[in-house]
Amino acid sequence: MCHISNWKEVRAESEDFSHTENDICTECGENIFFDENRGLVVCEECGLVQSEKHIDRGPEWRAFDADQKKKRTRTGAPMTYMIHDKGLSTMIDWKNRDIFGKEIPAKLRGQIYRLRKWQSRIRVSDATERNLTFALSELDRMASNLDLQKNLRECSAKIYRDAVEAHLIRGRSIEGVAAASLYAACRMYKVPRTLNEIAEVARVDKKEIGRSFRFISKELILNLNPTKPIDFLTRFISELELTPKCQKMAKIIIRIAEERGLTSGRGPTGVCAAAIYAACILTNERRTQRKIARVSCVTEVTVRNRFSELVENLNLGISLKKSHK
């Protein structure tokens, strides 16, 4: 290894270099960067050359806009768990157009139709793949209705695949296990979604989803932490169109309630709703109990009970008689 004295000039001459934050210098511990002009991996701080004749694994072509990149790329879509074969098989598009965008002649449409039909049959070969095809389409439908992110969908699909490999589907409905996998992924990524919300978009009831969730979480050893009231706070505040001041006040109330042990044995959504209602009173941003209960998917009685517990055990300066008027 050698040292480059004018490493700043080398870095300036490089038109484009990529940081590799996971790689650090073996001597000073600072980040290293790749000099594309010389093919060297150099330390930013001391100029130590980590490796020479570095292989560029990127494409040999350049693209200056999205259209050029789309035309010049020679790779397919990335692998995904949301397709039963992970997206590795060939798909024949349903549009009757060729690679140039021109319409396929009428003589060839019958042949293309038969090819498309046989291709769809070949892609699903056994019962396991048929199971995955139906379950993953259900997962995608439910996640779309709940507006969940792609990484969470991939996680839920991976959980369902693990359940299939462990033979946990036998004796249970596919929809129930799929909904339970989605709920487990929401808990894993700390995305606030309740069982009631999952049951609204699923084709099974809440009890079956709960039973399936407890079973797969135990068998697959998911080690999921309980949902906390503060996980729902940002979403409820946004739906109620409250100010950041009210959100900060509700967050403080929830923190104090957790320290006093008032959240144990209570539903997290009910405690969060009561804290928001108390914060609304303290910040003079009035919201009715009915509206807060509707947003938080609990009853008005639950909001009143949790609110009474907070007022009685915490020194919030709120009178129960005035708050109920």
Image (cartoon, grey):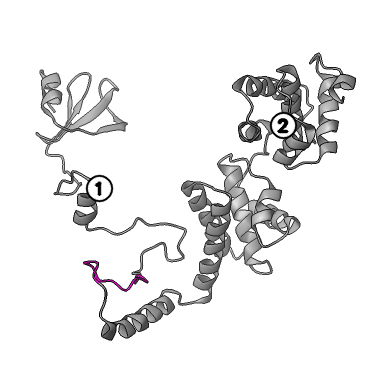
What's the residue at 69%, 69% (across, down)? 171
**Magenta residues, dominant SS class:** loop
Callout 2 secondary element: helix
Return the residue at label 2: 272
Along the line of sight, the residue nearer the viewer: 192 or 185: 192
- Which quarter shows the C terminus? top right
Count the labels in the image: 2
Along the line of sight, the residue nearer the viewer: 215 or 144: 144
- For the record, the magenta segment spans 92-102
For residue 66, the mark is 1
Instruction: Classify 10 Å Cα crowding around label 1: few (below 14), some (14-19), many (20 and above).
Output: few
What's the residue at 67%, 49% (across, down)? 197
Q: Is residue 97 magenta?
A: yes
**Which amino acid, mark 1?**
Ala
What's the residue at 15%, 25% (across, down)? 11
Q: Quadrant of residue 290?
A: top right
What's the residue at 66%, 67% (across, down)? 173
- Which quarter shows the N terminus? top left
Label 2 or label 1, whichever comes before in sequence order: 1
**Horizontal placement of 176 versus 301: left or right?**
left
Q: Quadrant of residue 98?
A: bottom left
Measured in 3D between alpha carbons, the distance from the residue under mark 2 to the one under mark 1, in whole angstroms, is 45 Å
